[in-house]
Image: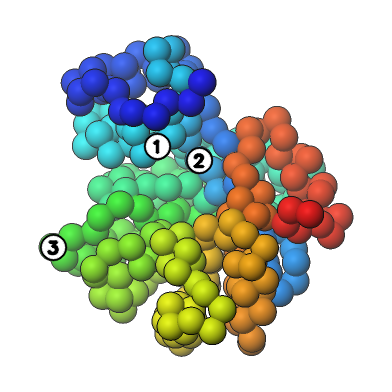
Amino acid sequence: MRQTSPIRNTFTLVSDAERGLGQNEFFFVLQPKLRLQQNRLSGFEYLIRWQHPGGGILEPAYFITVVEDSSLAGRFTDLLISRAAQTLVQWKMEGREHLSLAINLSAAELGRKDLPGRLKALFSSLGVRPCRFEIELTGVVHPDQLDWLVDAIHAVQAIGVRVALDDFGSGFNSLTLLQQLPVDTVKFDRSLIRQVRVNGESQRMVETLVRLTQNHGKRIVLTGLETKEQFAWAKALPDIDIEGQGFFICEPVEEDYVDDVICRHEGGAAGKE
């Protein structure tokens, strides 16, 4: 059963989440990203889910903001990083080091002073290349966070980890963040992709933003590709090396089914028939 409403209140949610961490109620699904021009799988995004005993499967929208503002934030970050690192080790053993893996972190968690050192030590001990790991900056970024956030991004980039700006286009300050944050990748929010219409004003606006992002030297990921028409539009964008992500390419899958996704896409299939 999938939950459609949030848990009763913040206190209950945090208390339940603490219990859930101890009882392994949290699990992960992975959603692939595709290099559209080459029709080639480039990596996955690691997404957390909560098998809540009274609420069914909860997606992050129902709990992550409250958790990030609580004392549990660091424990969730540690869980994400350790599980993602284990996946990268497995891929290395299987000869799949070309695949990257991304996790979502808030500005506060990305700004943890110990994060670069912990990542460097972890990847070194596991023999994992940091360049295959990406942190997606999620949530609201306030103007007064920019100075230290720039330093935090530089710190993780210095050890080889890439940083992406998630949800681009969903907030009023997206262009400011594009100009001021030294991220490697920009992920266009699904709300922008939904506006795409053939020969429409919205389509031209999105294409202009894509060009602007490219001119800033950023890698581009278009999320929310949910229809054949959206996928075809994104793939047809000329002279731009773009990654795509969305239900038309593949829905998020549990870890046991990742091998099937890799085999299907590396065999040349992309998108739903």
Packing grade of label 3 (10 A; few <14, some 14-19, many >=20) is: few
Q: Answer with left or right where residue 41 lies relative to residue 196.
A: right
Q: Check residue 60 in the rendering and tell me which mark sits there, or answer none.
A: 1
Q: Nearer the viewer, residue 231 or 258?
A: 231
CA gap, disc 2 and disc 1: 8 Å
Residue 89: give x, y in percent of width and height.
66, 40
Q: Earlier in the sequence, mark 2 or mark 1?
A: 2
Give the residue number, with chain letter if any, for mark 2: 47
Packing grade of label 1 (10 A; few <14, some 14-19, many >=20) is: some
* Depicted 254 relative to depicted 241: above or below: above
Residue 134: give x, y in percent of width and height.
50, 55
Give the residue number, with chain letter if any, for mark 3: 144
Packing grade of label 2 (10 A; few <14, some 14-19, many >=20) is: some
Tell me the amino acid under the disc marked 1. Pro
Q: Are marks 2 and 1 in contact (CB under 8 Å)?
A: yes
Q: Earlier in the sequence, mark 3 or mark 2?
A: 2
CA gap, disc 3 and disc 2: 28 Å
Residue 14 visible in rendering: yes
* Depicted 102 relative to depicted 74: above or below: below
Determine the secondary structure under disc 1: helix
